[in-house]
Every structure is written in C-alpha cells, then in structure tokens.
Image (cartoon, grey):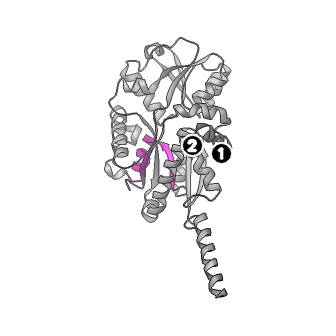
Amino acid sequence: MKKITALIISLLMAALCAACTPKEQLTVNVAAMKGPTGIGMAQLSSLAEESKTEYNYSITYAGSPDEVTGGLISGELDIAAVPVNLGAVLFNKTEGQILTAAVNTLGVLYVVENGDGVQSIADLAGRKILAAGQGSTPEYILNYILDKNGLAGSVEVEYAAEHAEAVTKLASGEADIIVVPEPFVTTALSKAEGARIALDLTAEWESVSDAQLVQGCLVVRKAFADEHPEALKAFLREYAASAEYAVNSPAEAGALVEKNGIMASAALAEKAIPNCNIVCITGDEMKAMVSGMLKVLFDANPKSVGGKLPGDEMFYVG
C-alpha cells in the first residue's frame, strides 16, 4: 500500500512539474524591434525567462530591420517582428520561405518639430526632414503622403541609421523636424525642449488612402511553421496575450520594457504605450489588412515590396 501511495505521489509531482515547464525542449528563436513590437513582446520575454511559457523562447531586440533580415534568411531566427513591407520583400527574396502570420502594429508615425512652423502637411514644403527606417515602412509611408499632397521633390528627406539617432539630433539642435514612431516620439518630447507633435501621419495617410495603415507584422519561416505548427500557434496566442497586457496595463508593461532594454525609462514607456497601436490580428482579417497596405505600397513603388506583389500564399493563417 505504501509503495502504491508513493507511486501516486510521484506521478502527481511529475504532472505538476510538467505543467510548470515548456511542453518540449524546442527553443523558438524570436526577434523584435526596439519599438511598439518590442513593447508588445515585453511581458512574453519576462515569462519566457521564468519558464512560464508553453515553449522555450529566446527573444532578442534589434535597433534596425537589417539586424533581423539575415537571421531569418539563414534560419537562425524562427519568428520576427518586422515592418510590414519587409514581410513581402522577404517572401519574394526567399521564394516563399518567409510567411506573414500576424499584424502587430498599426500606424505609429509622427512628425515632431522643434518649433511651431509646421501646422499642416503643406508647411513641409521647402523644409528638411530627418527620418529613420529607410527601405521600410517609414520611408514609403512618408513618400506616399508627400506625393499625394503634391510635395514630392519639394521636401528634403535625410535618413538616420536608427530612430534613436533622429531623436538625439533633434535634442542637440542638429535637426529641426524628424519623422519617428512611438515610443521614440515620447522620448523626443522629453529630451528636446520646445519639441511638439506637428503631424500625425496616420491621419495624413487616411486622408489620401482607403487602405488601413499597417506598419508592423510577425513573420515566420515556412519550414518552422510546417515542422512545428503547435509551437507557432502557441507563440501567437502568447504574443496576443502579451500585447493585450501592454495595452491594458501600461505601467506594469513599462517596467518590463525597461527591464528588457526596449526603452531606457519605464515612465516614458508607460506614457508612450497608449499611442503605440499595439495589436495582434491573425487569419483572414490580417490577410485583408496586409494585402490592402501592400497594394498601395506596390502601386506607389514596386521596389517597396520586393518588386512583385505577393498573393495569398504569402500568409500563414493557421
């Protein structure tokens, strides 16, 4: 009887331990940008470090899309948060080996000015702008808006290597007008005395386009999706919960953002989160949103999506 009782206790203990650890020893390698996509992943990072996720996740944060692209193509990364146009570029470049699985960031771009000379989009004529994100959505969104407002060629646009560099130059006086996404907008307002939000580029986009503005997406290697479908579904569930946590609990999420090195200040992260448009949209809704956005970008500049507009095979819909 004692042996049976001991066996039952051992089985119960094993079951409890199994419930506390990831389902299998597979490690899912993930990358996100230091921005809204990183903020949306902050809680998931912390849970992964504590082994409280369904699978093991190794999550890193990058300052620019270029740092992520090589890892996806080489197979070092399984999943990444990237600009939505880069999802199409990677799909075309790899001949269908990188799929888009979710929308995770809507419009987050703003024109920030040190001064008050820009009251409307027309006021950018003859001015110089410092932006970041060349070759990704910030460049193409800005160009599209300028073109549709008849300002192409009359606005000088230079590009910094990273959004943080644009913020630094605004604060130092080297730049008067910058285009950056949240949370860098909040950082700029805190660092540059006299800086203000001059234009919301989501509103400017909506005034000239019928497509919903989508800036960020989650992509996955097709081989990973084929080999580990349950792990991918688990990640999408847990990312969605992490994104919802950020939106609903900005103070707590802000602390995790600082802890994970996504932003230097929890207080600034808390302030920025309400304007970051963090989401997790999957399935047919995601496919329709991304397709509409890519069509606008393709019509404006085929190079922005890799020279060819992908079809439905670009999407992982579960």
Residue pictured at 66% horizontal, 36% vertical: 266
| Callout 1–callout 2 Cβ contact below 8 Å | yes
- Residue 159, by quadrant, is top right
Q: Which residue is mark 1?
A: 260
Where is residue 12 shown, x and y percent of the image?
60, 74
Residue pictured at 52% horizontal, 34% vertical: 276
Give the Cα distance between marks 1 and 2: 9 Å
Q: Which residue is mark 2?
A: 38
Where is residue 102 shown, x and y percent of the image?
43, 47
Whether residue 262 is visible here, answered yes or no, is no
Where is residue 114 shown, x and y percent of the image?
60, 16
Q: Earlier in the sequence, mark 1 or mark 2?
A: 2
Residue type, label 2: Gly
Highlighted magenta segment, given as a residue range: 78-102
Q: Is 189 above or below relative to 19?
A: above
Residue pictured at 65% horizontal, 27% vertical: 168
Residue type, label 1: Asn
Question: Is 10 included in the stretch rendered in magenta?
Answer: no
Where is residue 234 shown, x and y percent of the image?
48, 58
